Image (tube, rainbow, N blue to C red):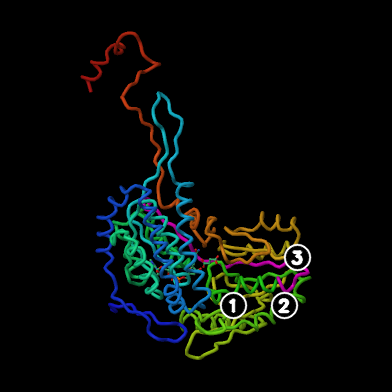
Amino acid sequence: MADHIISHEPATGAELWRGRIGDVGEAVERARAAAPAWAREPHTRRIELVRRFANQVRKQAEPFAELIARETGKPLWEARTEVDAVIAKVEISVKAYSERTGAKKLDSALQGHAGLRHKPHGVMAVLGPYNFPAHLPNGHIVPALIAGNAVVFKPSEKTPAVGHFLVQCFHAARIPADVIQCVTGGPREGKALVEHPGIDGVLFTGSARAGIAINRRLADNPGKIVALEMGGNNPLVVADTPLVDDAAALIVQSAFTTAGQRCTAARRLIVVDAMYDRLIPALTTLTKRLIVGEPFADPQPFMGPVIDNATADLLTESHEVLVSRGGKPIVPIIRLQPDRPFLSPALLDTTDLAERPDIELFGPLLQVIRVADLEQAITVANDTRYGLSAALIGGSPEEYDRFWAEIRAGIINWNRPTTGASSAAPFGGIGLSGNHRPAAYYAADYCAYPVASNAVEQPRSTLGIGLSDAEVAPPPGWRKTVRDT
Ligand code: NAD
Ligand code: SIN
């Protein structure tokens, strides 16, 4: 069995990083030992330290962005926005903590003190995906630390270098090394972490497949908090609009940013009949103009490669399967280099498929479905087990109201992309997209539990009702009954 994880740059195939697989048991033990002191630190001190972390990231912003670009293949311009999101997360989480999980005075009788406060769970496991290897795990780690938890973080086996860089920034901010640790490993170490009895909660971002496996594994442990942020099969509906070029740009941003490797990426473009012939030529032209290239290329590409060759193979094979079932390529998917995972963005009309597989194809492949009207569009959009993001382009305010009311998803936008979710809002989905523990602004909720207290300084009490003046006589014969039994 391999004792190392090696990551390669998707764009070049060059080895980027290698590290020994971590010892999950040891990391959890160290975290358990460190957690009580961290929880006892005044909340203001923990905030001061995470702000220092933000400053560390600011200082290292450019090398951090370069590392993200190398390890994920995303263009440098986009990697820089990921670093910005890591920094911004700190102030958002400070605000969210006090607003959602801070302390509150309640009315109390007898001049006592009644209140609501929150306590950390203890040790949290954070499992990260590869597509946002810094921003997404950071979105669990920062709120968990502010709330007073220790964290054991296992980054994706595809992006361990970014995971370690992130954790070094916490350590450089003088957050104790055992309070936030990075464990190198793959799904095997992920499973070991989830199952470890010393873990009080699992904060997971990744595929529905892995999320369901984690949920199953913890079925007998209702005491562990589990937050699952999973994938989507996200619909983007186009209703009537004269702004065809703008619609095409929104579609491209929704489907092809990050080479389609966003959980919120549009997977199904549902177009009302009246728009199809006007929209598709404009969308085709724009899609064919997108530059696919290496992360540091000049001029910068719109999108880079997908994460690895296996993923590129899966996507091209899925494209072929859909074509064999009746899908009509509008812009076919092309493997741009035989040995590297650069894929051209693809549009595939799957209107005539008897059955469209309800799976997440995590890459630059957008299925196009032609429908009669908005009513049918909503029915098709909801025909999924997932429910992460959805958007409507065009239509009237009344049609958007209807869309909003009838679509089942955690993010519902109008004339905005399905992607680019705000950290200042809750971020989560329904169905296979999550377990009703949204992240981002609501991450504070799963990082601490509420404790209601009622306290009076002296134990003074009287019974105001149900007392007789003298001792109540036992019913006749009760002693005899007791002796007889
Ligand atoms: P993945 O599920 O393969 O892996 C995510 C993490 O879980 C990795 O660290 C992996 O090692 C670990 N893991 C895998 N199987 C495990 C198991 N059985 N037990 C414990 N840990 C396990 O996901 P990925 O391929 O890295 O990321 C892409 C997926 O993430 C897509 O499905 C995407 O939609 C989803 N995603 C969701 C969100 C969200 O917030 N909803 C955000 C980004 C990505
Ligand atoms: C993601 O988390 O994968 C994407 C977030 C977004 O762009 O909405």
Q: CA distance from mark 1 to mark 2?
A: 15 Å
Q: Is mark 3 within 8 Å of ligand 2?
A: no
Are the residues at dot 2 and dot 3 in contact (C-beta closer than 8 Å)? no
Badge 1 marks a residue whose secondary structure is strand
Query: x and y percent of residue 400 in the render?
Result: 71, 58
Q: Residues within 10 Å of mark 1 (few under 14, many from 20)?
A: many
The amino acid type found where label 3 is placed reads Asp
Instruction: Identify which amino acid the numbered label 2 is placed on.
Output: Ile
Q: Residue at x 66, y 74 (%)?
A: 368
Q: Residues within 10 Å of mark 2 (few under 14, many from 20)?
A: some
Q: Which residues are magenta?
A: 222-246
What's the distance in space between the residues labelled 2 and 3, CA to CA?
Answer: 16 Å
Q: Which residue is mark 2?
A: 280
Mark 3 vs mark 1: in front? 1
Q: Is residue 190 above or below residue 308?
A: above
Question: x and y percent of residue 112 in the render?
Answer: 39, 27
Neighbor class of circle 3 (other Cα within 10 Å; few <14, some 14-19, many 20+) is: some
Q: Which residue is mark 3?
A: 373
SS at mark 2? helix
**Which residue is labeled 1 in the image?**
365
Tell how many labels.
3
